[in-house]
Image: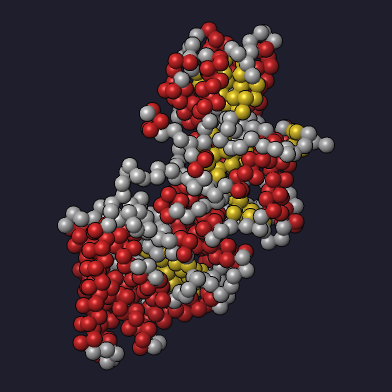
Amino acid sequence: MTRERYLTAYRWMLLARISEEKYASLYRAGKIYGGVFIGKGQEAISVSTAMALRKGDIFAPLIRDQAGRLAFGESLLDATRTYLGSRLGPMRGRDGNVHRGRPREGYMAMISHLGAMISVVSGALMARRFKGETGLIGAVSLGEGGTSTGAFHEAMNQAAVEKLPLVVVVTNNQYAYSTPTARQFVCGNLADRAAGYGIEGHTLDHGNDLADCLEVIGRAAERARGGHGPQLVVASILRLGGHGEHDDGNYVLDALKRSKTGADCLKVTEQSILTEGLATAQEMDQWRANAVHQVEEAVATAQREPAPDPDAEDWCALSTRRLGDGYDSDSTD
Amino acid sequence: MSITYLEAIREAQARALAEDPRVYIYGQDVGAFGGAFKATKNLANEFPGRVLDSPISEDAMMGSAIGAAIEGMRPIIEMQYADFSTVGFNQIVNNAATLFWRTQTKCPIVVRLPSGGTPGSGPFHSQSMEALYATYPGLIVMTPATVEDAYSMLLEAVEIDDPVIFCEHKYLYYHLKAEALPTEAMPTGKARIARAGRDATVVTYSAMVHEALAMAEELAREGIEVEVVDLRSIKPLDTDTVLASVARTGRMLAVGEAWPWGGVTAEVVARVACDGYNLLDAAPMRLNAKETPVPFHPNLWGTHRPTARTIARAVKDLLRR
């Protein structure tokens, strides 16, 4: 692990945290349409997933992946535009918050139905194989709740059958919305499910330890890239907050908050940077100030941009316009 | 030489595979076995590595097709029976159908649904799913009734840059034959006047076109001339051709093999009532399957769905209105 890699990861985590805190504050001020779902406490896992990827790889993030999205190459402005409903963002007001993506660039746009994006990434990897493109992998993020879906099971088995270079990173953050893990599954370790699919599993006990995250997820990615088939990583952490900004998470047990799992990965990382002398306090202050400035600039830019205009909107859901049914409420005009 | 509806589907896929390296077929038992109905017979052999058996995982089959389409492939997914597509429903209606609108990313997928009833097939191998899919923006729903359309519309479906739900009727697989494959085709989005007539219009699609044609033949002996409109695709639905026919006859019966609540016949009646009210000499009518699951026993099945006999009775009712 190089110092530079560790610090790069930290700076993405920092930018993610500061930008999401800003979105949360805009939400409380009533400036954001729809919900805000932040990845507080999961930045180390998320950034490590994206940093295990290279140019040309595929990434399907989920709701708590601001850090990974930024590290994968999404601009902060794209993220901010989507939250603020700018017409100039990638979703142009047609979809919001965490549903953004640029699929043609390998950055998938999640749907809300959990587990659904795993097989989508598998299909993209099958396409790469059809085209004879090798050395590329795909990564998918999921929470522990998503592992209870049929889509998860179908996709894991399918990826195993096709021996795809796929990394599925499951973040067990102890709650799926309000449901604790005890009501979600009974097995001791979700990574044990890998054996059932005939694939390799990896356990990441301390999802708030950035060095561990970079190492374990990085190793899984290299196994996938090396032709060893799908990899399942299960990382444990505590979600530091509610499900979204509408939820105060008052059901989260105090014992969990006080446990090692409940430690904030950003603080843990900052502490280790200082303890190990990887950077000075002054450098860190400078990074934080830079991140705050970037976020303020992105918000100011997106706030000045036009909102979608229903009269100018292209109300056609097909790319083949001639096959539009052309029979909607306007046809009575 | 003659060719069946099923062989036309096989030939269209063979041609698509031969002409476009982006095409591949993925589905249960479609590989060496050639598919449950043999719609992919010998294709795995002729096109190695491009006709792949899938696990019994309709959701993952569809999800992977979406990912492959994003990457520029043109997957053909065979659902073994249309009924089983409910397991892949989420990927079809929430992921494939929304992709272009949300992200401007094209999603060229053909989902083949062996549809409709045959005697002895029962509740889970007989369903007509077209209306479910048609209600979602972002999908095209084809319902070919002839050997020629089965061939040419499937080829067109593969070329379309949007997800196409291709409802091929199992009852027509072996029953329906043509002399040869077509050399030219009507475009999707245009309905066809399957039989001209002056007294009433029957609007229908898929296997019911043939029940309607048999009915029209029968009634012609009694001097009643029924016009039969074959919709060909139910989405887009060619309202203009339907209204033009109603303008000629003044009376309209919509017939479908699907269940009565909502659906294609309700949509056709709604459009004719809203946009062609003044063309009508009598209130329009609908005829559908009965409001129960599709029964297994041929005696029950033959009564559950509309037939030439029940359509003839409905047309006579319509003419008395």
The residue drawn where x is 58% and y is 62% is A127
Q: Is residue B127 above or below residue B110?
A: above
Residue B300 visible in the snapshot: no
Q: Looking at this rendering, what residue extends furthest in the bottom direction? A: A277
Q: Looking at this rendering, what residue extends furthest in the left direction? A: A29
Residue A62 horizontal side relative to residue A278, left or right? right
Q: Quadrant of the N terminus of chain B?
A: top right
| Towards the viewer: B249 or A301 | A301
Across and down, in percent, residue A50 comes to: 41, 73
Q: Is residue A153 above or below residue A206?
A: above
Render colour scheme: secondary structure
The residue drawn where x is 41% and y is 59% is A109
Quarter of image, res A313: top left
Quarter of image, res A214: bottom left
Q: Looking at this rendering, what residue extends furthest in the right direction? A: B1
Residue B115 horizontal side relative to residue A172, left or right? right
Image mark count: 0
| Towards the viewer: A146 or B311 | B311
Across and down, in percent, residue A87 comes to: 32, 54
Residue B178 horizontal side relative to residue A317, left or right? right
Residue B145 visible in the snapshot: yes
| Towards the viewer: B315 or A208 | B315
The residue drawn where x is 35% and y is 88% is A3
Across and down, in percent, residue B112 comes to: 60, 45
Q: Is residue A305 above or below residue B284?
A: below
The residue drawn where x is 27% and y is 75% is A14
